[in-house]
Image: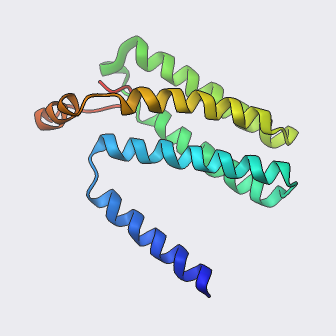
Amino acid sequence: MYNAKVKNYQKEALKTRIAGADRYEIIQMLMAGALERLVLGKVAIDKKLLEAKAEHISKASSIIEALRGCLDFEVGGEVTENLYALYSYMLDKLVDASVENNSAYLDEVSMLLKEIKSAWDAIPADVRHQTLQSGEYVSATGR
């Protein structure tokens, strides 16, 4: 009962946070969510909790697939192509982790995603604000 109330509260808090977020913040939240799922998936593999492993890896895969789907090839050029290839590689590694029950693949994906996230987080606030004010489309390339 208590756990259900906490989950409901967390879900409502997330909805509120998303409602007030700009596109940059939503992508930051997606990346953070994927990283969290990767940690939970690693714990599940290490503890041999196969159902939990499948759930967490599946959710991380869905988030990475959504990030890949946000890419705008017209705006991002070569950076977008490289990110697309990197996201595709990460998705392949998540399949490998799930099939082989090997958490080392999750570590690799986490490391790659952390690098992308740190670059995304480093976009100066004034650039973000200017891009959002101009109404330009913002892809996961930061352009």
Describe residue 85's horizontal placement relative to residue 58 as left or right: left
Describe residue 54's horizontal placement relative to residue 15 as left or right: right
Identity of the residue furthest to the bottom in this view: 1
Residue at image point 82% right, 49% down:
45
Residue 55 at what x, y percent from top left?
70, 56
Residue 23 at what x, y percent from top left?
30, 43
Residue 116 at what x, y percent from top left?
48, 28
Residue 109 visible in the picture: yes
**Quadrant assignment, res 134:** top left
Describe residue 63's horizontal placement relative to residue 78 as left or right: right
Residue 140 visible in the picture: no
Quadrant where the C terminus lies? top left
Describe residue 126's horizontal placement relative to residue 62 as left or right: left
Quadrant where the N terminus lies? bottom right
Residue at image point 46% right, 69% down:
11
Please determine whether, in this image, residue 31 is positioned above or below residue 124.
Answer: below
Identity of the residue furthest to the left in this view: 134
